[in-house]
Image (cartoon, rainbow, N blue to C red):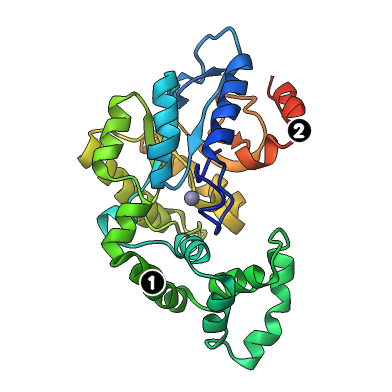
Amino acid sequence: MYHYVREPEEWKGSVPISPKAFEEQINQLSKTHEFVLPDDLNKKTSKPKCILTFDDATKDQYEIAFDIMKRKGIPGYFTVMSGPLVEKEVPVFHLVHAALSLVEEEYLWDELRLQLTPKDLHNLDLANKTYAYEQSQLRRYIKYTLNFILDSKQSKNFLEKMVYSHFGSKQKFIDYMYINIEEFQKMKQAGMTLGVHCVHHTPFDGRAEEYYKNEIAPCAKFIQEQFDIKPAWYTPPFGGGEKKMLMMENLKDRLLSEGYKGAFTTDSGIIDDTSSFWFNRFDCNKIFTGDSIGLALENVQ
Ligand SMILES: [Zn+2]
């Protein structure tokens, strides 16, 4: 499971894998595994199979990951988030990543704290628990405030001004940030599988029919219209989020009835049953660190 494939120094809001580390991973994996597309999960291969999956359709996946894979003749599965391309709507978490990459933490926090009430400030303690993985105290506060204290409209308002003014306009940011239609077309021509990620990157809220109608069907329609593909693979945002179990239960039949063959979660592990609908993945950043690489590959086999 890959997200950003770009230099961590230039993109600080999240945890990208560097182009060099990405290439090393796939070189390593190709010694022990055969890379396949999701449609080839049941293909007979002499080595265990591996599917490279990409979430969020950020530009680096086209410019870096796809470029490397194309040169090496390696197939992969890329997912589409249609909101930014169709409605020009950027999800809050991407604006957070951009703001943290472009603006100094101190400045960001000075501006942000002005939006908070004394009660909000008191509640900031919770940020340390939620974002324990972040080393910097300020980053914990910033992320917690934007994702949990302010509502999405307030966060968007604050972040859009900051991020779009840096790029000159919203459209310029979208052009910088996301794979565009022509680029997806080239990926399709090169044999990559395109699947559905979402429209707005909203987590599953428990209402399967509504969710299908709002977050899945419009993205599938976009893929069908633009690339002449009826998508058969799905990757839920945030792996389904807090209501993951409900999602797995309630969304499966709807997706099956629309012709989907399977979906990729963020649960960690190998795929031991290719006839199941929800598939495990390995996070590229968690599995290949130091000693765990040997162990991980042993487990995969
Ligand atoms: Zn995502």
| Residue drawn 29% across the image and 67% down it | 168
Q: Amino acid at mark 1?
A: Glu
* Image label count: 2
| Residue drawn 36% across the image and 57% down it | 214
Disc 2 marks which residue?
Answer: 292
Q: Position of residue 28 (x, y in %)?
A: 62, 22
Q: Which residue is more in the foreground, 262 or 40?
A: 40
Viewer can see residue 273: yes
Q: Position of residue 166 (x, y in %)?
A: 37, 68
Q: Is residue 44 left or right of residue 287?
A: left
- Marker disc for residue 160: 1
Disc 1 on helix, strand or loop? helix
**Circles 1 and 2: CB distance less than 8 Å?**
no
Q: Is residue 278 left or right of residue 289?
A: left
- Marker disc for residue 208: none
| Residue drawn 34% across the image and 35% down it | 231
